[in-house]
Amino acid sequence: MQSFTEENYLKIIYHLSENNEGAVQTNAIAEKMQTKAASVTDMLRKLSEKELISYKKYQGAHLTPLGRQTAINVIRKHRLWEVFLVEKLNFKWDEVHDIAEELEHINSPELVERLDEYLAFPKNDPHGDPIPDKNGNFDFVPFIKLSKLKKDDKGLIMGVSEHSSAFLKHLEKLGLTLGKSLTISAINDFDGSVEIIVENKKTSVTREIARHILIRI
Amino acid sequence: MQSFTEENYLKIIYHLSENNEGAVQTNAIAEKMQTKAASVTDMLRKLSEKELISYKKYQGAHLTPLGRQTAINVIRKHRLWEVFLVEKLNFKWDEVHDIAEELEHINSPELVERLDEYLAFPKNDPHGDPIPDKNGNFDFVPFIKLSKLKKDDKGLIMGVSEHSSAFLKHLEKLGLTLGKSLTISAINDFDGSVEIIVENKKTSVTREIARHILIRI
DNA sequence: CTAAATGTTTAGACAAATCTAAAAAAATAA
DNA sequence: TTATTTTTTTAGATTTGTCTAAACATTTAG
């Protein structure tokens, strides 16, 4: 079994390799782990010895199938616990991330399966992220970033790619929550900010925020 | 905030001082923590520096009010999670201890309060142990050990003082579960074993087992 | 009340995860 | 392509919780 720290490294390597396909760099991991590159190097060597990643000096890291499986299991637990916190304990979507960061390391396969069943096998967490099934398979639904839409495009808010409380509270205030349908009324050439109509109300988000809102057309 | 290890030490010191009132001895802690006396000495010094216990060399340990508070909070979480596992996820009473040992260290006061509310503020865990409220107060219900009863005494099973799966499964098989009422039909002078009638069926337990069954007359 | 047994602490060491400072490799730019 | 910058690794140290072996303190028994 892995330590919490090892699991966190694997999770971060997984997320970093989701976007850009190549090897995951030491510095990128260091930034996400809020630690120093030197510490990352030590850990990469250790994870490599345990055959959870493949790693060659100066070449960055790749998850092995075993490492990938481990990472996905942690992500599965994280997202299931988030659903539990929101659906059963009435937390808001901006309050659950940190608690789930702790709960994701609880090590009991039986608990995870029963929790999944208790929650009626949810497909997505409160931020729209897909929850892998017990075999690690995602039910992938394609989406595009709000920042890619053009004027007059319509879409449905499917998820967010940023989980900070500040960001989520902001969206909530603007009425931009999961499942809402929206129309792009204008795009500001100057700064890329996006004008949106949601439930007949006009609102506006910066380009940076638009990049973190995921849409199904 | 304390580490998991520190919390476990505090919890064990609390339990050991529940029974015998005096100072808690190094060796006793070592046995419960499955570690060596030398390690315990190191930890006692550390807990003492943090003012969670009072400790003088060769004199054993006492919890300070702060240490006691911390221990009770861990116990509160442990027992609430056990209720959750049994009531909501349909685990059996002999399956929940180890999982709760992990969950008890999740650090979110808000989570504990919401869980408590979700479970309708239970007063006892699945083994009959009282759950302290958020201020650390126990709703104490007096009980006596089954091993103290005499022939023809009647009582209600209120709890157990041993949480191992093997022990609980054994009780289950004999029909000796929480809330059952029983009558002592005989006590064997030779080995102290106790003959019991539960739901019109006669059964028998050893003295050692009887010591761990808690009864309200 | 001394001697033996029991209980506890000290000394020194180790593994995990981290750090700083400095060296080395790779990437980028002139 | 050489020089500069960026990235990564190494070396050596620190903290936490643990260990063994040996010393020391306390309790118990004769």
Image: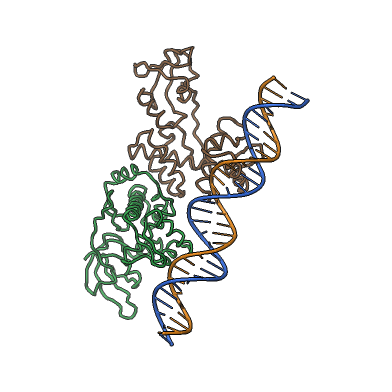
Chain colours: A green, B brown, C blue, D orange
For the point 38% across and 24% down, which residue is it? B176
* Residue B127 picture quarter: top left
Left or right: where A201 falls relative to A89: left
Residue B76 point in image, percent of width and height: 47, 40
Q: Nearer the viewer, residue A133 or B20?
A: A133
Q: How many marks?
A: 0
Quick check: B183 above or below B96? above
Q: Nearer the viewer, residue A83 or A184?
A: A83
Percent x, y for residue B91?
Answer: 34, 37
Residue at screen point 35% across, 61% down? A62
Residue B188: x %, y % from top left: 46, 13
In the image: residue C28, left or right of residue B32: left
- Left or right relative to A42: residue D20: right
Above or below, C2 against A171 in this view is above
Q: Which residue occupies the foreground of this view, A106 or B149?
A: A106
Q: Position of residue A67 (x, y in %)?
A: 35, 55
Instruction: Classify A28 as above or below B7.
Output: below
Where, by quadrant of the figure, is residue D28 drawn? top right
Q: Quick check: B140 left or right of B51?
A: left
Determine if residue A37 is in view. no
Q: Quadrant of residue A189?
A: bottom left
Q: Is residue A69 visible?
A: yes
Whether residue A70 is situated above or below residue B181 in the rendered picture? below
